[in-house]
Image (tube, helix red, strand yellow):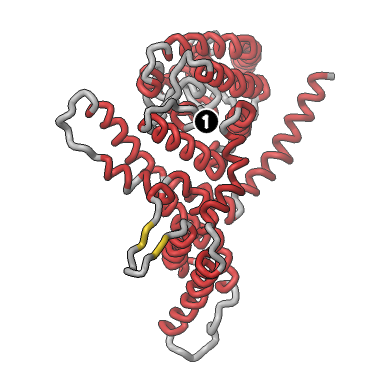
Amino acid sequence: MEDENMNRFMDWLSNSFTPTMNKFAQRPWVAALSSSMQKIIPFILTGSIIHLYNVLRSYITTLPNLVRIINFSFGMLGLLTAFMVANQVMEKLGHTKYTINAGLTAISVFLMFIKPIINDNGVLTVEFARFGPTGIIVGIVAGYLVSIIFHFIGKRDLLSESSLPDFVIGWVQNIIPIFTSIAVAVLLTFKFDIDLFALILKVFSPIQGFGQTLPGFVLLIFLMTFFYTLGISHWLWNGIKTPIFMAGIAANIAAVEQGLSATNIATNEAVFTAGLITMGGMGATLTLNLLMCFSKSKSLKTVGRLSILPSIFNINEPIMYSAPIVMNPLLMVPMWINAITGPLVIWFTMRSGFLNIPSKMIQVGQIPAPLSSVMITEDLRAIIVYILLFIIYLATWYPFFKVYEKQRITEEEFEATSK
């Protein structure tokens, strides 16, 4: 009966749920957000490199201060997001003539949304922090607002049958959506005196706040892992996790600079850089990989040994698709379990004060743990947590792996005798 229920569940996942989710993820309005978040990663990594450099600078004080590079890379994420969302929506919808102008218009709208003050002398003043990670959601809203207007007008293909010169038609087709987008932002910001930055953050704060709670933290990691076992990359969740993680680490950095303690655990640094929750990659597959390296199954041993080097650097696509784990119920279940136990251990060790909460932005997830664990937490106790989680993950994978190994050995023996 249990096998029958499992077969039905897997059939539903394979033939109904996964195709539906893949189709949803490929929708232009959804795919554009995921693509936008991927395209701003180089700016995030630029800031990460400077934070890593600052660790060295704390020991060699004569090195130059590169904080301005952080300010105008990582510190511009909201502004960059506004451009990229509008740009990518236009690209995904096929409005290639609007990709640049829609993005530039979104920048103008974003600048109004962060509520600048312009005095009688024409001096514009705005809180610099509004440009950065806390402005990502505002950038997304600005980008989508502009995209809706450009898409609505673009579908009408105004003056397409006119005898006017092409360049004139092009001007008109761009001027109307640009004017409309900026006019809407002007009305909201200056006519009605609405602080859209504060309003948008207030509306979305429950989502960000929930992400920084234990249930929200575990749920986010579990969902990314669950969909990964279906072959759907965790990039799908960028639009949700990036604003939460970026705001979290930015708040931690600011708190430490003010002499306070970091409090946000839901950050890219705690989840990916530390290599504790993602030991070997999303779903903590390193110990499974090690078990495969010494498997009695020839095929599993081969896959394990070919995948072990990437796994050490927290890259587990080879083992995910070669073992395979994707759509394999025997290996999907322990991966789901790891996506719950890992975050729980990290949450309680950090919240209890046993392990430091990351307060530096270093978003490089391919540094082997526990080296990365100690580096990002600045805490040697991270080694103890690493060993603890290693044992937990190993104990979780082992019984499921042995059953799967037995199946593979039987299949290999059958294939050998059939030749």
In which quadrant is the C terminus drawn?
top right
Q: Is residue 183 above or below residue 367?
A: below
Please, what is the three-letter code of the amino acid marked with disc 1? Ala
Q: Report if residue 279 is visible in the image.
A: yes
User: What residue is at 43 percent from the left and 68 percent from the top?
Assistant: 101
219 vs 190, left or right, is right
What x and y, as percent, mark residue 212?
56, 32
Question: Which residue lies at the image location 24% right of the left edge and 26% below the top edge?
Answer: 58
Residue farthest toward the front in the current orientation of the protein: 120
Viewer-proximal residue, 27 or 100?
Answer: 100
Residue 66, quarter of picture: top left
> Would residue 307 be seen by someone viewing this image from the given angle?
no
Q: Is residue 2 above or below residue 387?
A: below
- Label count reads 1
Q: Position of residue 249 (x, y in %)?
A: 44, 34
Residue 294 vs 145, above or below: the answer is above
Which residue reaches farthest left? 62
Question: Relative to 22, does residue 414 appear above or below in the rendering?
Answer: above
Q: Nearer the viewer, residue 291 or 63?
A: 63
How many residues crowd around disc 1 within 10 Å: few (fewer than 14), some, or many (20 or more)?
Answer: many
Which residue appears at 45% of the width and 27% of the height?
A: 262
Q: Position of residue 179 (x, y in %)?
A: 49, 75
According to the picture, the residue beneath numbered tag 1 turns out to be: 266
Secondary structure under the numbered disc 1 in the rendered image: loop
Give the residue furthest to the bottom. Answer: 163
* Residue 364 left/right relative to 290: left
